Image: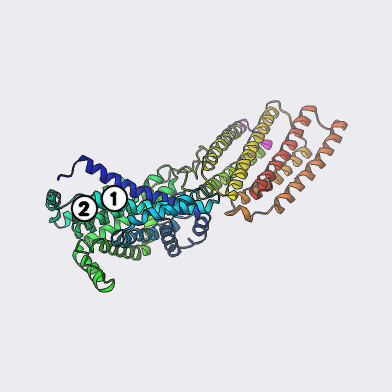
Amino acid sequence: MEFGFIDVLKLIGALGFFIYGMKIMSEGIQKAAGGSLRRILSMMTRNRYMGVLTGFLVTCLVQSSSASTVMAVSFVNAGLLSLVESAGIMLGANIGTTITGWLVAILGFKVSMASMALPLLAFGVPMLFFKKAKIKYIGEFVVGFAILFWGLSELKHAVPDVKNNPEVLHFLGEYADMGLLSNLFFILVGTLLTIIVQSSSASMALTQTLCFSGIIPFEVAAAMILGENIGTTITAELASLAGNVHAKRSARIHSMFNIIGVTWMVLLISFTPVLHGVSWIAENILHVADPYTAEGAPMGLAIFHTTFNFLNVAIMIWFVPQLVKTAIRLVKSKGEMDEIYHLEHISTGIMATPDMSILEAQKEVANFGERVLKMNGFVKDLVTEREAKNVSKLLARIEKYEDITDRMEHDVADYLAKVSEGEMSESTSIRIRGMLSIVGDLERIGDIYYQMSKGLERKFEGKVWFTPEQRKNIMDMFEMVQTNLEVMCRNLSSSSYSAVRMDRAKEQEEALNKFRKTIRKEHFVSVEKGDYNFQSAAIYSDLFNSLEKVGDHTINVTEGITGEH
């Protein structure tokens, strides 16, 4: 019986079934623990050692090293993690991903999980229809777990029957006895396999299955697993393509970790003693079958995978600073792009859960606030500028920034709308509504500053001058608004919106309103006395009224942060 086209499709379908189960299981647990993941990543990455522990725990929790590494890249992109902190997470993720191999070895080959799949679905599917979100997400996890091991069972049945298809072994035999070249060839095979299926866990399970079925020997499977460690880095590299320079550097560090690790394993340590060591551990410590036999191969590969990643982390953790410096040299910054509009923090796309996505959007909104703060400085400089060339530059810059604020509002609001399409908790929904309100207020501040610049342009062209008292009042009011905006930006940059208080913002807003009322009264008296001409009075009035409106919008932003808006 030959292994034909239909059999190939069955093999691919079984692998797809396994990957789909892993996806549902991973996303379900991420949704159920979204807030917890956010807190873990924000507080447990203070140094590279804690980062390793964090990466390990998160990967064990979500059962996907790709999810952990993409999360780390996205958080570096958002400025929530440094390169050193992200390096620790990725090292930990490398150890955490070995857990899947153990689950597959213990449950997939020792226990008939396929026979447990239907009972698990009997529990999981009804949970999907619960109104309570957390129960629904746990149901997704259970359903994904059932599908994953059902897929593994199908995978075992889909691989070719070696007894009836000896040509498969003959084909592999041509490449299995070339020493170092054989190792490099099967490392390449493992790398390509992982790139194709986009899951190191799935390619690991397939390798274990092929070894269990007697299709590939233990030595070949071990080489393929090393290749799978390289192939898994492609996911983080792809995620970083749309990110900023820091995201690209973070992904490059992950690639260097794994490539260097595989290199020292291949070049410095011969496979034979390492694999004999794995065999000794399996037989003498774990008391399981010899990995060189078909029955013991899945467990032996799990031991090898864990041992390699643990040793690699133990060695590479001491070289994190050097790897960070190398990544910075390899991925050059394109320089300050402050004048060019681009979303810096949410360009890596929607993440698996709204909680994770909101962190990126939050950082982008904080960036939006900083741009508005700069506009205050530009317009303030325009009040006192006398040189025509400098006035033209300031006007062009303010117009460019106003255009940027328009597009930022549109893009951030569009991103938040996409995030809100997924299932989320009530608190997450409130945060998204608050952020939509915030970007609307920030865009309106940009419009106000642009209108103020047009008034000042007319003042300059008409050679209309302020009195010393007018100029002092306006400059004092600009300073007060500057303080208001700085308080607003600090609140927007807060890692936890729930920790923000209204007190400071309200004090500043009340002081601004009081000052505006005072100069407004003085202004009417001066107009009646004829202290300055109509044109000067009109522009002066527009400026202090506009600055008061900016103050109103800044307090609205803080109310949006605290949920009071």
Instruction: Point out the stretch of residues depicted in magenta.
Output: 382-393
Q: Which residue is mark 2?
A: 186
Helix, strand or loop under label 2: helix
Choose between 12 and 179: the one closer to the eye: 12
Residue 389 lies within the magenta run: yes
Kindly report the secondary structure that dominates the magenta region of the rendered protein.
helix
Q: Residue 52: horizontal and vertical position, in percent?
A: 42, 62
Q: Please tell me whether residue 397 is drawn above or below residue 149 in the rendered image.
A: above
Residue at figure coordinates x 56%, y 47% from the top left: 362
Choose between 542 and 562: the one closer to the eye: 562
Q: Residue 466: horizontal and vertical position, in percent?
A: 75, 34
Q: Residue furthest top?
A: 462
Q: Which residue is mark 1?
A: 154
Q: Residue furthest bottom?
A: 284
What color scheme is it? Answer: rainbow
Q: Quadrant of the N terminus?
A: top left
Q: CA distance from mark 1 to mark 2?
A: 24 Å
Q: Quadrant of the C terminus?
A: top right
**Amino acid residing under circle 2:** Phe
In this view of the protein, can residue 326 be seen by the observer?
Answer: no
Q: Please tell me whether residue 448 is drawn above or below residue 18 in the rendered image.
A: above
